[in-house]
Amino acid sequence: VTIAILAINNFGGHFVSTVNIFSPAVIAIVLFLVGAAALLREGPEDARSASRALAGLMFFAVATWIARIIVIIVYLAGTTDIQRVDMVISLFAILQMVSGVGATLALMWVDVRLMQAELSRIAHTDALTGLPNRRAVLLRFQAEAANAARRNESFGLAVFDVDHFKQVNDRYGHATGDIVLQETAGALGAAKRAEDVLGRLGGEEFLVLCPAQDSRQSREAAERLRSRVAAMRIEHAGHTLQVSVSGGVAFYPEDGSDWDSLFSAADARLYEAKKSGRNRIVVARAGAPAGDL
C-alpha cells in the first residue's frame, strides 16, 4: 500500500511533498498499533513479560511517529531554517533508531523465553504421550508431600502397568505398542480428577498422585482408573485390541513420607497385582497386609 501511494504521488503528475513524509508513517502507525494490541491480548504465555516490553516499545515508536508528524506540521511548516530542520529530523531519527534497537532486543528476549519454555517442556514431558515424565512427577510429588505435611492431610500414590505389553509389541509391532500407550494415557487422563497428577514413568508404567485423599478414596480412584482402561477398545491396523492395567497403591503418611518409601510400597503392590492375575488393584490398609479390591 505504501509503495502504491508513493508511486502515484511521485509519478502520477500531482506531487505533494508531505505525502512522501506522512504516508509511510500513517500506515506504520496503524500496523504497529494492531501488532502491539495483539501482543498484549494474545502474546505467548511463556514470554508474557517480554511480549509486554515489545508492545511498549511499539507504542513508543508510534508516539515518536505521531510527534514527528505534529512537529513537521506545526514547528517546521514554511521554515527556511535548514539547520533547525536538520536538527529536528536528526532528533527523531535518533529516537526511531533507539526504538528499533529496543524492539529488536525485546524480540530476542521473546525468542529466548520461548526457547527456555520449550526446553523445560522437553525436560519434563514424555514425548510419546505428552504426560509429565518421571522428573516432573517427582517434583510434583515433593510439592504435594510438603503441602500434605503442612496441612496434616493424606494423599495416594498409584502405580499402573499395562498388562502383557511385551506381547503387544511382539505380535503387532512397536507402532501399535505406541498407540496402546497413548490410548491408555488418554483413558487414565479422562478418568482422573482435575487436581490429580498423571505421569508416565517410562516403558508401560504410569503413576497417578491423588492429592487430599484418604486411603479409601485413593483405592476407589485407582479402581475407577483401572476400569476405564479395561473398558476401552483400540482399533488399529485392522486389529481390535483390549488392554488392561494392574496397579498398586500406597498412602501418605501410612506407607511413608518420602518418594522412595511410597513408590517402593506402590511398586511392590503392583507386582503383587500382576502375580494375582492382572487387571486388578492391590492396596494395603493401615495395620493390614496388602489385599486387592
Image (cartoon, helix red, strand yellow):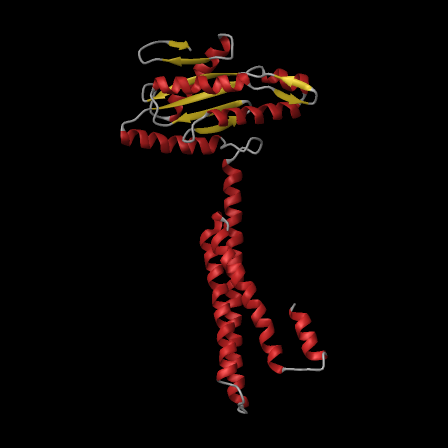
Query: Horizontal and vertical percent for residue 107?
Result: 53, 58
Q: Is residue 122 above or below residue 145?
A: below
Which quarter shows the N terminus? bottom right
Q: Residue at x 32, y 19 (%)?
A: 254
Q: Is residue 27 above or below residue 16?
A: above
Q: Is residue 53 left or right of residue 178?
A: left
Query: Horizontal and vertical percent for residue 278?
Result: 51, 11
Q: Residue at x 61, y 21 (%)?
A: 234
Q: Residue at x 59, y 19 (%)?
A: 233
Q: Residue furthest bottom?
A: 80
Q: Quadrant of residue 287?
A: top left
Q: Is residue 246 above or below residue 83?
A: above
Q: Is residue 158 left or right of residue 165?
A: left
Q: Is residue 265 visible?
A: no
Which quarter shows the C terminus? top left
Q: Is residue 147 left or right of residue 63?
A: left
Q: Quadrant of residue 129?
A: top right
Q: How many marks?
A: 0
Between residues 219 and 159, which one lies in front from this camera angle? 219
Q: Is residue 60 left or right of residue 9?
A: left
Query: Horizontal and vertical percent for residue 7?
Result: 70, 75
Q: Is residue 198 above or below residue 74?
A: above
Between residues 41 and 139, which one lies in front from this camera angle? 41
Q: Is residue 117 visible?
A: yes
Between residues 194 and 99, which one lies in front from this camera angle? 194
Between residues 196 and 164, which one lies in front from this camera angle? 196
Query: Horizontal and vertical percent for residue 133?
Result: 50, 31
Q: Residue at x 32, y 14 (%)?
A: 286
